[in-house]
Amino acid sequence: MLQASLASGTANRRSVFELFPRRLPDGRRYGVVAGIGRVLDEIERFSFGSDEIGFLREHHIVDEATLDFLSTYRFTGDIWGYAEGEVYFPYSPLLIVESSFAEAVLLETLLLSILNHDAAIASAASRMTWAAGDRPCIEMGSRRTHERAAVACARAAYIAGFATTSNLEASRTYGVPSAGTSAHSFTLLHDTEADAFRAQVESLGRGTTLLVDTYDIAEAVRLAVEIAGPELGAVRIDSGDLGQLAHQVRRQLDGLGATNTRILVTSDLDEHGIASLAAAPVDGYGVGTQLVTGSGEPTCGFVYKLVAHEDSAGRLVNVAKKSQDKVSFGGKKYALRRLDANGVAQAEVVGIGEPPEDDGDDRRLMVELVRAGEVVGRASLAEARARHLASRDELPMRARMLQKGEPVIPTEHVGGD
């Protein structure tokens, strides 16, 4: 596309691209925007060096005119979008990219790959943390996904309410708080379970978390308290009927005087499994596989479409794809969240052009992210996390339901094609 547009003289036409979802994943009531910070980082360093140019030339992928363009490529346009942590709905204009066609079209895969992945993780994480209530969730999915994706997963999960991650690279790179526990291999390494517990407590202190389901859980709990004393930080259960076992372990811990020792549970938990443990004496959840695979929805289905371009006369004209089942809406968009008198979301309003004057019941959703190629809208991870909690709390109560359903608020299109 780049080569052909350069050859035809249309590459420099002012163009507006929009990144949006046509629908939510099946049965989901809302989605969560995540990955904006990573997008901004990547846009700043997105260029074609000598190695990339050499590869393209050697394999005759594009012509010399295109290689010349790529060799000096930097994005110099403007980007607006939803702030990271915001919730979204069908046809929410998550990103608006305005620049020459040549500059904007090169960003398509970069933007879609980051946002489709990170938003899927955050959307699943949000459902999990809502189901968990005040009990913390620990991200523990690094061994169940690509090594680089694992870092992005931890970041996205934290935005959506997870308390900590076991991935230290996510802690180093993004400042996500880290925490972890020992594995069964540590217990199996020692001659006895008591030797394993003693070694861990002596090295890490009485506040450590001991894994108690390698052999017999009741005997392991007894040994754990005997070795660490009532100051033992926590025990972890990783198998069996977690609800029933949690009740048994709680009674045993209390009977041994370890009334402040917490119970953590793991074992392929998802939002439904977490919700089923609401009445159990569980103090925290470790979540891995289901989180990093989006709890069955590993992508959001975002698309990146041209919605307006400059014509041969220099006028900006709206364009849209009209094929069956893949309809787009032309024009540069704005987005508002309509709220009732109590601050509860009623609709996602998507319109063409400039948004109307605020009449007191509409919250503007889009923020400036990039201006003339310079990042101007970077937010901290803490800000994104706080934004998500506030945005989620605006939703009607039925948004908490885990059963399949329609989007919790409708999307209303105002004006345009």
Image: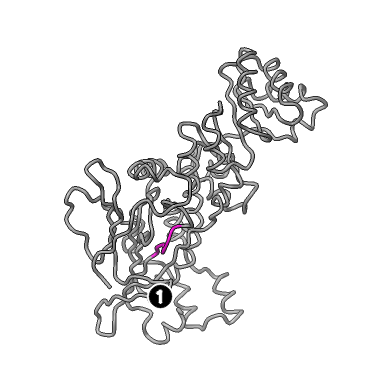
In the figure, is residue 295 to the left or right of 350? right
Residue drawn where x is 52% and y is 32% of the image: 278
Q: What amino acid type should be assigned to the residue bearing mark 1?
A: Ala
Q: Which residue bears the numbered disc 1?
A: 102
In the figure, is residue 95 to the left or right of 341? right
Colour scheme employed for the rendering of this structure: one colour
* Residue 271, above or below 66: above
Q: Position of residue 26 (x, y in %)?
A: 49, 57
Q: Position of residue 62 (x, y in %)?
A: 53, 81
Q: Position of residue 214 (x, y in %)?
A: 74, 31
Pick the residue in front: 167 or 354. Answer: 354
Residue drawn where x is 35% and y is 55% of the image: 82
Residue range highlighted in magenta = 19-24
- Check if residue 23 falls in the magenta segment: yes
- Quadrant housing residue 306: bottom left
- Quadrant housing residue 272: top right
